[in-house]
Amino acid sequence: MNFSEVEQSLNYTFKDKQLLKRALTLASADADNNNQTLEFFGDAVLEFLVSERIYDEKESEGSLTERRKALVSDNALTPVSLRLGLDKALIRSPHDGANKKAVPSAYEAVVAAIYLDGGIDAARAFVNSTLNFSGCGQEVNFKGELQELLQGRGESCPVYKKHSVGTPQNPEFVSEVEIFGKTFSGTAGSVQEAEKLAAKSALEFIRKGKLC
């Protein structure tokens, strides 16, 4: 691996190169020394730094929560990882090419690695320079909109049923929601994203006037 190219893309030079290697190593390539725990830690560090960045904006708590969820979602982190070239730098087994979750997770793992290598200021600088805080491309809260629409009609809150259709290396989930006797579904690499897609499908159907 050419660490210098990755570091140039990240605009950060690691004192401990092994941290960077670990952040880019998937469990399929190394069962013991991979990025899973870094991903776990990076998720928490990222949520803190994003919260720190947006907390004093003049929005309600609910709006800030939704904005943070949008900024740290797989949909938001995937293009960032691709832009930084993390997808090409991942160390994986030859049979692990379809693991879509690995791309956004790499960003979280790198955030943790930078934090451990250079401290909170270095992690903050990295997050602030790579994430788009402008609000452009912010996700629509389909689940919230569907619940609000149904409650406005005196209906019960939607209940989502989910089941896994993927593998540990390539997780995939199907979520279903029943509205007025009709079932709508969504398939994605996480339960949350699958539920959003199911809610989106139901909303589109209702707004086309096909359900009264």
Image (cartoon, rainbow, N blue to C red):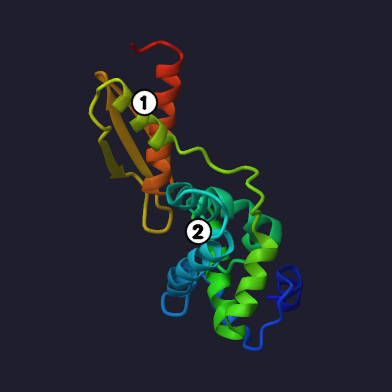
Amino acid type assigned to the residue bearing label 1 in the image: Leu
Observer able to see residue 24 = no
Q: Nearer the viewer, residue 28 or 22?
A: 22
Residue 76 lies left or right of residue 134; in this view the side is: left
How many residues crowd around disc 1 within 10 Å: few (fewer than 14), some, or many (20 or more)?
some
Residue occupied by mark 2: 96
- Residue under the image location 54 percent in, 66 percent down: 52
Height in image: 146 above or below 90? above
Picture coordinates of residue 88, whole percent (x, y): 66, 61
Residue 202 lies left or right of residue 13; in this view the side is: left
Circles 2 and 1 in contact, beta carbons < 8 Å: no
Height in image: 66 above or below 196? below
Task: Tally the numbered discs.
Answer: 2
Picture coordinates of residue 212, whole percent (x, y): 33, 11
- Residue under the image location 46 percent in, 13 percent down: 208
- Residue under the image location 34 percent in, 32 percent down: 147
For the N terminus, give its image quadrant. Answer: bottom right
Picture coordinates of residue 169, whole percent (x, y): 42, 58
Amino acid type assigned to the residue bearing label 2 in the image: Asp
Element type where label 2 sits in the image: loop
Q: Nearer the viewer, residue 81 or 87?
A: 81
Height in image: 201 above or below 66? above
How many residues crowd around disc 2 within 10 Å: few (fewer than 14), some, or many (20 or more)?
some
Q: Nearer the viewer, residue 194 or 155?
A: 155
Q: Which mark is residue 149?
A: 1
Observer able to see residue 42 = yes
Picture coordinates of residue 176, whole percent (x, y): 31, 33
Element type where label 1 sits in the image: helix
Q: Nearer the viewer, residue 203 or 91?
A: 203
Q: Which mark is residue 70?
A: none
